[in-house]
Image (cartoon, rainbow, N blue to C red):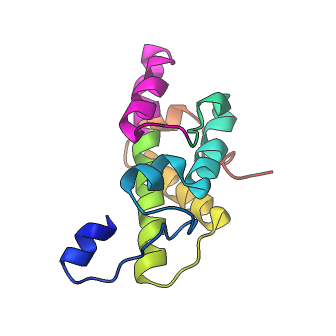
Amino acid sequence: MADRLAKRGLPHPTHCPLCDQEDETVQHLLTTCVLAREFWSWILTPLGLQDWTPTRREKSFADWWRKATKRIPKEEKNGLNTMIILGSWILWKHRNACVFEGSHPCITRTLEEFRNEYHLWCLAGARGLCMLGLGHSVGQG
């Protein structure tokens, strides 16, 4: 990501803007960043899927996603896929707010953004996502 921004002469971080611990890559941002792993843990735990939280050893976001969807009943795959798309979108938006707006990384704000978007996506007709029942439980407690 940073290399693409550099080619275009745009501002870019040399390290992950969420953890400042590793080079910024899509893989790192979505799965191995400490903030991303905490985010996914908060999202997956209410579903009883905390064991599916990405680890630092994940090879790729796509592989992690594929493994996660293989472990659930067929009727829940649509909801889980939508949740992973939404979660990725929230992490990406949070990253962009840190890079382009000077925001500071904050798991609480990220989870709040997820809850807000979750409700909007449900209102827009994401039935599989709504069936997961995540709206109030994420980031609470």
50 displayed left or right of 28 = right
7 displayed left or right of 116 = left
Q: Nearer the viewer, residue 73 or 131?
A: 73
Q: Is residue 121 above or below residue 107?
A: above
Q: Residue pushed farthest left?
A: 8
Q: Residue at x 69, y 52 (%)?
A: 139
Instruction: Give the residues in magenta.
Output: 57-82
Q: Is residue 67 above or below residue 86?
A: above
Q: Residue at x 45, y 24 (%)?
A: 67
70 is within the stretch colored magenta: yes
Quadrant of residue 70 within the rendered picture: top left
Evaluate whether residue 62 shows in this view.
yes
Residue 84 rendering spot, x and y as whole percentages? 45, 41
Give the quadrant of the N terminus.
Answer: bottom left
79 displayed left or right of 1 = right
Q: Residue at x 48, y 66 (%)?
A: 16
Evaluate whether residue 128 shows in this view.
no
Q: Nearer the viewer, residue 19 or 51?
A: 19
Residue 20 rendering spot, x and y as whole percentages? 56, 69
